[in-house]
Every structure is written in structure tokens, then in C-alpha cells.
Image (tube, coloured by chain):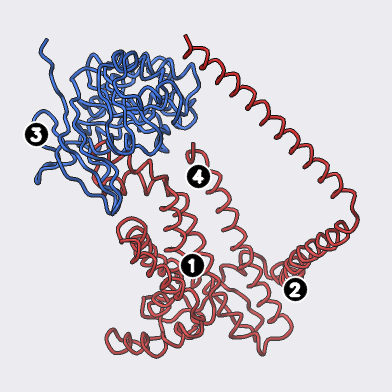
Amino acid sequence: MEKAIKMKSRELNLFYGNFQALYNINMDIEENRVTALIGPSGCGKSSFLRSLNRLNELIEGSRISGEVFLDDSAIYEKGINVVELRKKVGMVFQKPAVFPMSIYENVAYGPRIHGIKKRSELDEIVCRSLQSANLWDEVKDRLVAPANQMSGGQQQRLVIARVLAVQPEVILMDEPASALDPISTARLEELIAILKTRYTIVIVTHNMQQAARVSDYTGFFLHGCMLEFNRTEELFLNPRHNKTEDYITGRFG
Amino acid sequence: MNGIIEGKITAVKQHNNREEKSQILQAKAGRWERILVILRKSKARFIPEILVEKLLMLSAVVSIMALLLISVFIFSRGVPLIASVGLGDFLFSLEWKPIQGKFGIGAMFVGSLLLTSASLAWAVPLGLLTAIFMAEIAPPPVGRIMTRMVSLLAGIPSVVYGFFGLVIIVPLIRNYLGGTGMSVLAGAIILGIMILPTIINISRDAIQAVPLVYKESSLALGASHYQTIGRLILPAASSGIITAVVLAMGRAIGETMAVVMVTGNAAIIPDSLLAPLRTMTSNIVLEMGYAAGDHQAALFATGAILFIFILLLNLLLNFIRRAGKRYAGN
């Protein structure tokens, strides 16, 4: 079967000052699939995630070598429009960062930034995004309420709706469920399963079961290197590397 | 086969090990409890503690008493005069002729409001933009140096500001714009500089208190840095920024020495930025040296009005903070 590669990294090295956070990462991220990144804290998986939408550039003294491609265009090339890149590659953070405004305004934030002013158009985007994030039925009667009055799980889905509103192609998720209770986590995982039919998803998680449940591919990171990358069931059932086996069976990390 | 047995042995060993550890932990906890009981019973530790407690309470009571005494004093001397003149006449009458027994502080009342608004009008935008630069745009070392410089600005005694105004600003205005130079404009310039540190420091803190993840989320949605500042960071910091403005307003209304030195102090409502004015604080400091009887009481009454002003500003602050909490934080 022909694989469609949405994003790929080639010989990617990342430095923070003198510290090298990533070593020669080569990864193919397949379209409409969920790719999970696992590994102990500080192994570089979040840094890798942030290098996919150039968010690592916010950190003072960060440097990169090697290349990252989105649909065959190199995103670190000079002259690449970072705004366009980040519109296409959306991101969900660990702590649901709802903005201090109403539910409606949270979702409308991105479209407004990108110049959509007409109320009817905004209404439609907000409604569609909230529906896609499985949140519409819960909030449709209180769109003007402050967003921080929602539960943690609802906030995380609101953040996803906010990302969907700018119509991305890839969604990066940095431990999206680590602050959620088990029920909200389950709902988030259901949502991920639905979203992958339309988007390409890369998710960083500390939760091995979660990686096994939601992802099609898994990459195991250790000390800034990607030790192993494979189909998820391959990686969990027949890990090639004994460090991978140690980690997924909980013997260290 | 052997491997499996070995594995089991290791598991059992680990299990025993864990139990031992938890026993040690329990023993440690028990020891702490015993130590706490001993400490509670020991009087040697108790006596200094009571002393410290009393000392702290005494200090608190003295501070509060100072506030109470001052308020009682000001109001007991000032309120009877306001009552005899009538609050409306006292506040709004433009006739301040103490010798003829006419006590209307209308001109000073307007003067205080006018000078405060004039200084806020330029110091708030300048201070806010400076705060944004320091918090969001300047490289951290530059931001730190600027923070120190702003603190220095706050530490300059007000008489020095007044002196600077008198020697530099007033002649400049006289030479280039006309009039005596002792004017609303001179006062607004000096007062504006004096309230800049308040505006800068408090708004910068408010901007820096906006969680980093807001900024990252906004940038990750494809917003530019300036869009993020304008549409997310400033609104999120708005209650802190309004607090900065209100505190600056309080400082501007209360400022006396520098204002007296550069504004000319005529008890009339100014008809232009180049005309002199007199504020309520100036009124008190200019006349308290020789005032007696009703005249003195009228000065206390002016103080009482100022006091109420500051009180209202404080109430407004509380209100802003409570309103700010509605949206802030998660």
C-alpha cells in the first residue's frame, strides 16, 4: 500500500545553547494517522514536537540543523511564512490553555487573527469547530460564558476546537490528557480517533496504554535520540531495542 | 525454567524490600509525631513565641491606630466647616476668600482633577508602551537594566522633581510657548514623569503574569507576536493595567511639593494649558502656615475631601480586582 507522508524530519538536530536536545532524528509522519511519541521526561519528545511547527524558536538560544518537511516543502527554509506553517500545523498543550474570554471568542480567536470579520462566517466556523471537537452539545447554550468556568476535559476539547477553527492539516498534541481525569481522557481519545480521519495527529504521551490505544505509529525517544520507530503494535509486542522493552514494561523511566 | 524461578525469587525479594522500606518510613513518621508532642509541651519554646505574637499584634494595632487618629482628627476639624458652608458650596463655589469668610474650593477641586487628567493623558500611554517593551520585546538584560532605572525614577524625592521643573521646564515653556511658564502644562509634565514608575512597574508585572502558555497557544494558531500582544496579552492583563492607572491617579492627586513649585498656584480655574492653577494639596500647604480658626478648618476640610477621594479610588481598585478575577486564571 502506498503511504502518504505528511511530514518528515531528516537528520534533525536541535540545540539549546551548548546543550544538544535532539540527535539526528529521521521520522516519517503518515497522513491521517496518529503518531505517538513516548519516552522518559527530558528525552526530547516535546522538543521534537515543537520543532514541527517551529515553536522551539521562542526559546532563547535554540538552534537547529537538518530539515523538516511538510508536504515536501522544507519548513526551516528561508522565506517560509511561519504564520502559514502554524496555521497548517496546529498545537494542543499539556495544560488546557483557554484564553480569558468567552467560549465563543476562544474559538473565534484564530479566524479573527486571520482576517475573518463577518459575524455569520465566524458563527459558522465556531459551530463547526465545536461540533468537530465533540463539545457543541455541552456548550451551545452558553457560548458567551467565560471559558475558564468549564471542566478540565471541556477546556481541553475547547482548545482542540480552537485549533480546528483555523483549519489545520496536522495537529500536534503535547501530553493533552495528563491533566485530565479518566473519563475526560477517554472522551479525548475517542475524539482523537475521529479526528484522524481528517487530520494527521502527532501526540506526545507519558501514558503507555494511551499510546497503544490511540496511535498507529510510535516513536521511542531516549536522551535526545529516537531509538525505535515502528507500527504501534510492532513496537509494543516485539520491541527491537531492549531499552524500549524496559521502558514500555515500566522497568525505568 | 531456571529463568522463571530466578524471576520469581527477584520478585519476592523486591516485595520484601518494599515492606521493609514502608516500615522504616512508618517508624520515621512515629518519631516526628513524638518530637512534635515534646515541642508542644515544652514551655521554653512557648514563652518567646507568646512575646513575638504580642509584638506583632502591637505593631499592627499601632499602624491602624495611626490611621484612625488621623482620620478622626481631619474629619472632626473639617466636617463642621463643610456643614456650615454646605457641601455643594464648599466643593463647587469658586470664591476662596478666607479673610471674608468665603470658603469655596471649586477652583482647586477642578484644578486637582484637571492636573491629574492632564498628566495621566500622556503618562499612561507612554508608561504602558514602555511596560510592553520591557516585558515582551526587550532582551532580558535590557529589561533588567530598565527595571532598575525605573526604580531609580521612583526614588527621586518630589522636591527634586519640582526643582527640575522650576529650573528647566518652566523657563522652556516661558520662552517657547509664552506666559509665565508656571502652568498646567509644567505641572502635567512633572507630575506625569513622577507617576510613570507606578504605571510602568504595575503594568509590566501584569503583562508578565500572563501565562506563557497563552502566548504559545496564540503563536501556534498562527498569530504574530504583535497580534498576540494586542488581542490576547493586553486584554488578559487589563485588570492589572487598570490597577496601575488608578494607583497612578491616587499618586497624582496626592502629590504636593513638585506641583506647588511649578504650577503658579492661582486659585482660579485655568483657561488654557499655559495658565496657572492650584490643586487641593497645594491649597493646604500654601496656607497652613498662617491659617487660623475657620480658615484652618477649611484647610482640614480640603484634606477631608482628598481623603474621601483616595478612599473612593481604593474602593474602585477592589472592584476592578474582583471583576478581573471573573476571567483570570484557570
Inspect the image, locate mark 2, and give the three-letter code of the amino acid beneath it. Answer: Arg
Q: Which residue lies under the disc numbered 4?
A: B324
Q: Which one is nearer the viewer's eye here, B156 or B31?
A: B31
Image spot of residue A106 (x, y percent)? 35, 32
Q: Chain of mark 1?
A: B
Query: Mark 1 against mark 4, which lies toward the viewer?
Result: 4
Where on the picture, by quarter, is residue B121?
bottom left
Image position of A253 with respect to B35: above or below: above
Residue placed farthest to the front in the image?
B2
Q: Colour of chain B?
A: red
Inspect the image, locate mark 1, and give the three-letter code of the amino acid beneath it. Answer: Leu
**Distance between the alpha carbons at the discs numbered 4 and 3:** 45 Å
Query: Mark 3 against mark 2, which lies toward the viewer?
Result: 3
Q: Earlier in the sequence, mark 2 or mark 4?
A: 2
Side of A238 where B275 appears, left or right: right
Picture disc at residue A73: 3
Q: Are marks 1 and 4 in contact (CB under 8 Å)?
A: no
Q: Looking at the figure, which quarter contains the C terminus of chain A?
A: top left
Q: Which residue lies under the disc numbered 2?
A: B77
Image position of B210 with respect to A230: above or below: below
Picture disc at residue B113: 1
Number of residues whose C-alpha sits closer than 10 Å to that of mark 3, classed few (under 14), some (14–19) or many (20 or more): few
Inspect the image, locate mark 4, and give the three-letter code of the amino acid beneath it. Answer: Gly
Q: Colour of chain A?
A: blue
**Distance between the alpha carbons at the discs numbered 1 and 4:** 26 Å
**Distance between the alpha carbons at the discs numbered 2 and 1:** 24 Å
Query: Mark 2 against mark 4, which lies toward the viewer?
Result: 4
Q: Chain of mark 2?
A: B
